[in-house]
Image (cartoon, rainbow, N blue to C red):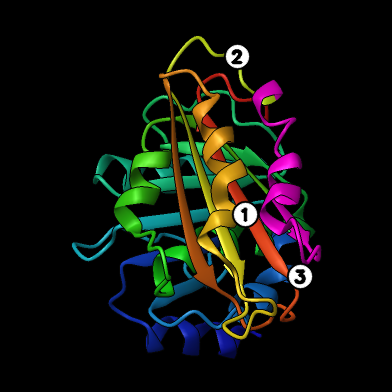
Amino acid sequence: MEKEGITQALKSWPVSFRVFCIGKEMSGIFRSIVSLGFEGVSIQSTSMFPNPAPTDEDKMVILLSDGDSQQLESIAKSFYQAGVLTLIVSTTTIDKLNGICDAMTVSHIESMPFIVKSLLEPIIKQGKINYDFNDLYNTLHNTEKFKIESAISRNNENRIAELVDNLTDLRGNFILSGSEYISLVFYLNKDANPPLAISEFQPLLEYIGGFPENVSVLWALNYDDNLRPNEIRLDTIASGKNLKV
């Protein structure tokens, strides 16, 4: 596993997006993160690279940790103060976020590969309705907290409507007293059957229209050929200082 980590790190250097696994409990998911197979992403363990530093090429760093630690805060602070979008995914809440990172979320270790995939996939893969790094940056920059959820529809007639219905609890996760941000990224197989019609997105537009003006909503459409032709997946990235994580 250590040799694989070194190979992955060297193969993709220099890069714009970096992922670090921090803590003794993180060794079990390191291989899972590497197996996501994203080109141009450096994936490293701090057991091998204990003092990573930001470079001029860095745009985003994702720090996966088995809890709060001095090492986590030191690494996060160095990237954040260098202007790199700095995201922490930890098994415990990090209370002192000011000057440390842009945003953090709490997750079980086994769910961290899914979070990494949801953050990287839309900005690395070319979509039908595109979502790029600037969109992700605007969604997460200096928002303190973020949360990612996913749902799949196999309903041939009302696929988008069914996924939007799954979002009904999302508004309950916000205390709408400040600026909040939501990105909705839909994924389908390129050979989707039946083909997706633009008219199917009307429930989504109505849903977005129901948010207050201080909630910024972006949406995109991308491809994932790991999905079956009758499946559509929706990944929701929500952020904001008042978000419940």
- Name the residue at the top extreme: 177
- Identify which amino acid the numbered label 3 is placed on: Gly
**Residue 203 located within the stretch drawn in magenta:** no
Q: Could you tell me residue 124's position as x and y percent?
A: 41, 72
Regarding mark 3 in the picture, which secondary structure is present there? Answer: helix
- Magenta residues, as a range? 150-172
Q: In the picture shown, does residue 71 fall above or below 55?
A: above
- Identify which amino acid the numbered label 1 is placed on: Asp
Regarding mark 2 in the picture, which secondary structure is present there? Answer: loop
Residue nearer the viewer, 99 or 59: 59
Q: Quadrant of residue 9?
A: bottom left
Q: Which mark identifies residue 235?
A: 1
In the rendered image, which residue does mark 3 sit on?
28
**Residue 167 located within the stretch drawn in magenta:** yes
Measuring 41% from the left and 40% from the top, which residue is drawn there? 139
Closer to the observer: label 2 or label 3? 2
